[in-house]
Amino acid sequence: MDISQTRHNERQAPARAPETLPGNEILEKQITDLRTALIARDVIGQAKGVIRILFQCDEDAAFAGLVQLSQDSHCRVAQLAPMILDMVSNGQALAQVTMSSLKRGVETHQRSQV
């Protein structure tokens, strides 16, 4: 079959609109999920920066603090990070319970690195 026959055959079969392609909804959900993940990572990174300043620690220790807080509060890190940023940006002090969890996570990580 030559190219002219291929083009002729393509013209006979109408192209399906993208919204009717199988799996298109799945792809759209994946794109939305990826965008959400990118935004969450940026917010988590900013929260780690706040924790690094508060506890004078490295990035890994700051993340360990977030993980500890997540476990203690039964709340996902991606949900905690914006709360921390909101409080700090509004000039509010973090609750003692929050600070204790963060500190415990940071210190546990630091001890494991020695």
Image (cartoon, helix red, strand yellow):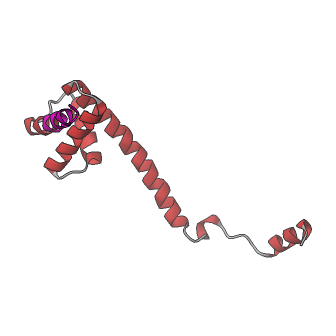
State the image quarter where residue 107 is shown: top left
Q: Position of residue 25 (x, y in %)?
A: 51, 66
Q: Residue furthest front?
A: 114
Left or right? Give the position of 15 relative to 34: right
Quarter where residue 84 is shown: top left
Q: Is residue 89 visible?
A: no
Residue 2 located left or right of residue 87: right
Compared to residue 103, the image places residue 77 above or below, namely: below
Name the residue rendered at 19%, 27% in the picture.
Answer: 55
Which residue shows up at 81% across the image and 71% down it?
A: 10
For the N terminus, the image quarter is bottom right
Magenta region, mostly helix, strand or loop?
A: helix
31 to the left or right of 13: left
Magenta stretch, residue numbers: 103-114
Q: Is residue 64 in the magenta section?
A: no
Residue 98 lies, in percent from the top left, at 13, 38
Tell me, yes or no, whether the highlighted magenta stretch contains residue 112: yes
Q: Is residue 79 visible?
A: yes
Q: Residue at x 20, y 38 (%)?
A: 65
Quadrant of the image occupied by residue 92: top left
Looking at the rendering, in which quadrant would you find the C terminus? top left
Answer with left or right where residue 8 lies relative to residue 17: right
Indicate whether 108 appears above or below 10: above
In the image, residue 94 above or below residue 1: above
Can you give x and y, in whole percent of width and height, for residue 109 in the image? 20, 36
Q: Residue furthest left?
A: 96
Q: Position of residue 17 (x, y in %)?
A: 66, 67
**Foreground: 109 or 34?**
109
How many marks do you count on the picture? 0
